[in-house]
Amino acid sequence: MKPYYALMPDTGSPQENTVALEELTAQVRVLSARVIAMSEGSRVRGERILAAQADALRVLELTHDDDPGTRRRLHELRARADYDEAFTVSDPLVSVVIPTWNRPETLIERAIPSALAQTHTNLEVIVVGDASPPEIGAAIDALDDGRVTFHNLTIRGPYDEEPFTAWHAYGTPGMNAGIRLSRGAWIAPLGDDDAFVPEHIARLLAAARDARLEFVYGLIHMILPDGSESLLGEFPPRMSQIGLQAALFHAGLRFIEFELGHALFHKPNDWGLVHRMMRTGVRMGMVKEVSVDYWPSQRDQVVQPEADPLPHPSELAGTLVALEDRVSGLEQRLSVEQQRSSSIDAHAAELARRLEEVRRSRSWRLTAPFRRMRQRS
């Protein structure tokens, strides 16, 4: 398609060019107004589509999570004879569950030692490999501590090929397997590169037993790669302000599992679990003291791909605004050319007038024979 200025006539009188340019200017302005109106309509429709999509995702998530069934099982748990034992036994066993893949240094030097150093000593540490390499099992065997066991899954994931979606689901199979293997009355999840503070279990356990809480958590001390630090934690729970590594929950809740499918709803697996517990009435509380040191790893800092934003009508009309500016520039150039053309026309008229005066003069008639002789020669 030719650019709009190619539609301008290459030749023609200034009057013709002026008319053509005025017509083109009017067409561009009409087109610009139409594009603005159409793009505004598209933006409104796009927002409605996104809202409908969000509603559909929420409905699908509720269907996926089966909240009515989860509530029914929660009521059944509370009615069981052994439910109260978690609150009444003087020294309950606590199961620390650590899913891992291939971070042996932080697992062996940070995570497991922090679990074994708890002031509450009646615990077991269950490490589950996400199809981890043999080095992980060998490193755990080298600890030679009967409180620590290792179980390795035969396949990793499976996780989505898109990195951000996969990040939402990392560790899901290992956490579920570890919770199923646990023997404790309470579950304490831990990341393979995080560290409990020494009072983590004792402090949360005391809060849970005092208030008969089924899920309790503390503050997260986050340490960024640049050395800066901050505290995370709010009540009620909110995504990005809670992490399972800072929590302790009643082992009877193991029927509420981590779900790979939550990644499709744009939720990290731990927040998916907490949100389900919130919706189904699990009794929750928070201790406003630090429970865990958390070092975000590169895998924890996967950036969400940016969606193409719906452009504002003014942005969509930007090209047409540029066209209008170009047309305005052409108008100015045409005005200059018209002035020049008018000046040339006036000069030519003056020359023609003078030539006519010469032709009518006596000297022109007297020199006529000489001009004819020169033409013949």
Image (cartoon, rainbow, N blue to C red):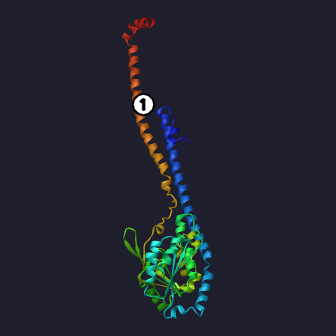
Q: Is residue 185 placed above or below 22 in the rendered structure?
A: below
* Residue drawn at point x = 49 percent, y = 49 percent: 319
Amino acid on which disc 1 is placed: Ser
Asked whether residue 194 appears in the rendered view, the answer is no
* Left or right relative to 228: residue 305: right
On the rendered structure, is 351 left or right of 137?
A: left
Q: Nearer the viewer, residue 230 or 184?
A: 184
Query: Which residue is at 48% across, 51% downward?
Result: 318
Number of marks drawn: 1
Looking at the picture, how far across and down is residue 21, in whole percent?
49, 40
Q: Quadrant of the C terminus?
A: top left
Q: Position of residue 146 (x, y in %)?
A: 50, 84
Residue designated by label 1: 341
Q: Dot 1, crowdedness within 10 Å: few (<14), some or many (≥20)? A: some
Residue 237, image x and y in percent? Answer: 48, 79
Percent across and percent down for residue 90 are 49, 94
- Which residue is drawn at the image coordinates 58% and 90% (left, top)? 78
Compared to residue 2, the image places residue 317 above or below, namely below
Name which quarter of the figure residue 334 lies in: top left
Q: Nearer the viewer, residue 332 or 238?
A: 238
Considering the image in quadrants, where does the N terminus appear? Answer: top right
